[in-house]
Amino acid sequence: MLAATVVLVPVAAAAPPRKGVFAPGKSLGGLRLGMTPAQVKAAWGSSYGRCRGCAQPTWYFTYRRYKPHGAAVQFRRGRVEAIFTLWAPSGWKTTKGLYVGDNVDRVAGLYGTLARADCPGNYYALTMPTPGGVNAIYVVNEKIFGFGLLSFRASVCR
């Protein structure tokens, strides 16, 4: 989904969870909105790429170097503003059991009718605002492609 340039920082530690859980309005992969960079590093480690072309500092955590599967964290004023998956990482799911790779038809049965935001690049986001932020379920070719937890000022399209 992201087409920006990444610079890798070669410090190995942790990574996003292999089987991350999206708790809408609360957390994605164990991270929460408002966390500091130090808290993110404590949770996911220091092995991340930095986006060169992003308006806000954005870190990419991938499972294998130079491969796009994983998750990303965007900061604003030193706090997490957005957390989102990258390139359909298998094993990720919501607390209600919606998995990356499921057919989009499952969403309505689990979450009701959600607003749709069409994004550049042939994908869209189904959104549900909660007091804890905007929750996004990303869809490509009518399959669940990923998840996002964003502050109200962050763009849902990634």
Image: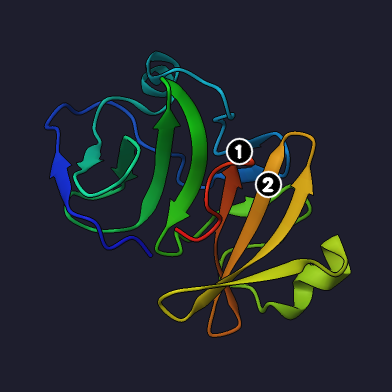
For residue 133, side relative to residue 125 (left or right): right
Q: Between residues 53 and 114, which one lies in front from this camera angle?
A: 53
Q: Is residue 104 left or right of residue 36?
A: right
* Location of mark 2 (residue): 134
Locate residue 104 relative to residue 45 in the image: left or right.
right
Asked if labels 1 and 2 touch by Cβ distance under 8 angstroms, the answer is: yes
Q: Is residue 30 above or below residue 144?
A: above
Most foreground residue, 122 or 41: 122
Instruction: Please tell me in which quadrant of the rendered image residue 72 appears.
Output: top left
* Measured Cα–Cα span from mark 2 to mark 1: 6 Å
User: Please, what secondary structure does the residue beneath circle 2 have?
Assistant: strand
Amino acid at circle 1: Ser
What amino acid type should be assigned to the residue bearing mark 2? Answer: Val
Question: Could you tell which of marks 2 and 1 lies nearer the N-terminus?
Answer: 2
- At x 68%, y 47%, the residue is 134
Tell me how the rendering is colored.
Answer: rainbow
Q: Residue 95 in the image: x percent, y percent?
A: 74, 47
User: What secondary structure is marked by label 1?
Assistant: loop
Residue identified by numbered label 1: 151
Q: Is residue 77 above or below residue 50?
A: above
Query: Local crowd at mark 1 within 10 Å, few (<14), some, or many (≥20)?
Result: many
Q: Position of residue 130 (x, y in %)?
A: 79, 42
Residue 28: x and y in percent read 58, 40
Q: Which mark is residue 128?
A: none
The image position of residue 106, as x and y in percent, is: 77, 73
